[in-house]
Image: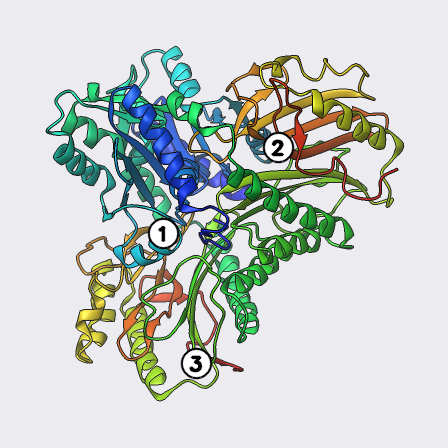
Amino acid sequence: MSAPIQAERQRRLLSLMAEHEWDTLVVVGNAWRNDYLRFATDAGVIEGQAIAVVQRNGAIEVFTESPDEANRIAAGCPGVTTVWAPDPSVEAERRLLGMGNRRTAIAPGAIAPYRFTAGPLAGRFDDATALLDALMRRKSAGELEAIRRASALADEGYAVFREAARPGRAEYELVADLEAYYRSRGCPDNFMILGSGGVEVRGMHPPGERRLRPGDLVTTELTPSIDGYWSQICRTLVIGEPSAEQQAAFSVFLKALEAGIEAVRAGVTAGDVAWAENEVFRRQGLGEYVTSEYTRVRGHGLGLYVDGRPAVLENVDMVLEPDMTLVVHPNTYHPKAGYIVLGDSVRVTETGCEVLTHTPRVLFSMPG
Amino acid sequence: MRRGLIAWSPEEVPPETLDARVRRLQSAMRANDLGAVLIHTCFPRPAGVSFLTQFVPYWSEALLVVVPDGPPTLLAALTKRVHGWIREVSHIGDIVSAPDLGRAAAAYLKDRMQSSNGARIGVVELGSVPRALAEPVAAALGADALVDATAMFATLRQPADQAEIALAERATGIAAKSVALFAEQNGRAGDKVSAAERAARAAGAEEVAVLVALDLAQGTVFRWLEGETTIGRRHAVQISIAYKGTWVRRGQSFSLDGRDPPAWTAADQWLARAIPILEAGRLDLWPSTESTAPPGTVTGWMLEACVGTAPLSVAAMQGKGVLRPLPPGSLANLTVRMQTSDGPWVRSLPLILGGQGTTTRPLAPIFLGTPP
């Protein structure tokens, strides 16, 4: 856990609570969506769900659904009181009802347990989601340092991935090598998906049993975390020498990434960045492949969540601010080559961005 | 976010097995007058849907809709580009693209429930599903239409069938090898964890969590290792493995002296006698039902099992009694901590719970290593 970062985050959080006159803030998290909870308490959830009740005086209780999880959080978060219960939402509800009539807010609203809005606590909560989003959007110096270290780990991990990618190896064996490397580096968590094959491949997924073959495009996004902060790299390699079609296809992605990164600066919108990437494809007659039929987003926010806001899409008008962090990735399908990914993580600055990813932006070729 | 190999093996989990599980649920639905049952699935809570379909989401979320007849339908917030992948890794009826899962569920159900006046919809773990999912459904069909199906589902979830036991045995084997590699690896804590994790994933584990109590002199809390850490002379590891949706935990304390101290060996022997008398229906009496006193103070024991959407939930524990009743034949995981004259001792292992004439059977040896 990250004590210096947490002290700074708590200061900001308590200041927000005072500003909005919230006596209590309820923060929900789980093993997937832990950003708000980690920001508020520094508690990382490994299994199940946890609910934090934060008081304006800084007192924090975290309700978990296993005693081991409660003990682990207590050991790593001095000052946090943990309570475990078979259903932490029932226990948290009891606690909140016992506190009487206090001004209470909750975040993130979407994953709050239905009990909180359908039961005796219905109508009691202000939605703090957007305000916490704003707090988490611009990273402090300590947070940026964690993201830089995660970015370096992403680069290192990709080097391991390249070496692991050999004909005959199964996708899940590549992931085994990667995860083993990250554990040896003291990095406890990583989100990665990958894809392998040719023009029939439309996206990435968790590892399967498919074995790599000469000529395969092998795509991956690696997203390791340091102190709860995630950074991402997306790269594509070829088993053997790239074909002319693969090289030509890749050059579009390279231009699109460069255009996207060039567009990033404080004051532009996420939509502007997406437009810059997509225009490269459209100018090449590939406009169909930047639609939702083929691609989800052209990048996304990074921080305490792997897939944060903003979604980098043309219809997203969130304005980029200094010290926001995101990944720019024009990942999509190319009809002549298959699915290709290329993405770098960046920090927004007043005049542009600091690129956090240092792996060369090339179509790697590994021995076939 | 640790997804390893996700794959459905019709040999290991035949479609007939999954169909039979769905039919049992449908039978219970008819008996309880439920027009549909909804089971939410997401990364932290995949177990309800994976039990019926083998589908495990690697991110995002989905909702399984089971109606009284026919295969279940998956409403998936995941992009429809991965529907092909979902089909490969699961046995499922229709897959419906549902980027806004709550609204999609509301529309889907309203369409289908309209002809069934007053139809009740069971929702597994209704109180804790995300409000963004439940509220639109409640708004469309009426909040009174939603009933909590948690207890009903729990009665169907255990005992484990043969397919699940076989998966648990495979997972236990994977965990045992990983624990052994952790023990054998010299040097840094990170290298030990790395060796254990690589072995588990290379053996096909879908999910791996290697948690370490670095120094038993400081406590027995299992934690992820972050940064550079130093392993203590006596330490413990707990490796949780998911293999095709079935979870086991294997945990063991170790001494860098190369051999278990005498009190730990005595504790293993005590546990080997005590496990067979762990019994469904008498969990709150364990381990005092074992006639020989433990060679130390049992500071905590916990029995976990899958009864809902969480892979493992606490079913019984020291000081709390039985929290979720389990029938004989349940697949469960036991963790025991004991303070001995040689310091803290920890063991975790999966077992099949006995009762009503059957004896509790561990799926793994109590201790990994050379028996005394």
Q: Amino acid at mark 2?
A: Ala
| SS at badge 3 | loop
Q: Do badges 3 and 1 share one subunit?
A: yes
Of the residues under marks 1 and 2, which one precedes in the sequence?
2
Residue closest to the far bottom: A244
User: Looking at the rendered structure, which numbered label has been put on residue A215?
Assistant: 3
Pick the residue in front: A105 or B201: B201
**Chain for mark 3?**
A
Q: CA distance from mark 1 to mark 2?
A: 28 Å
Q: Nearer the viewer, mark 3 or mark 2?
A: 3
Reply above or below: B174 against B293: below
Report how many numbered discs are placed on residues in the image.
3
Residue at 67 percent across and 22 percent down: it is B300
For the N terminus of chain A, give its image quadrant: top right
- Is A363 on the left-hand or right-hand side of B147? right
Along the line of sight, the residue nearer the viewer: B67 or A119:
B67
- Badge 1 and badge 2 in a common chain: yes
The location of residue B100, given as percent across then percent down, is: 22, 43
Q: What kind of residue is marked 1?
A: Asp
Relative to A193, say whether A54 is above or below. above
Which amino acid type corresponds to the residue marked 3 in the rendered image?
A: Gly
Q: Residues within 10 Å of mark 1 (few under 14, many from 20)?
A: some
Chain of the residue on which disc 1 is drawn: A
- Quarter-wise, where is residue A174 in the image? bottom right
Residues marked 3 and 2, same chain: yes
- Residue found 76% across the figure and 26% down from its top: B271
- Chain name for mark 2: A
Residue in the picture at 51% in, 18% down: B325
Instruction: Pinpoint residue B5: horizontal percent, then vertical percent.
Output: 50, 55
Residue B97 is left or right of residue B291, and the answer is left
Residue closer to the observer: A156 or A249: A249
- Residue labelled with disc 2: A75
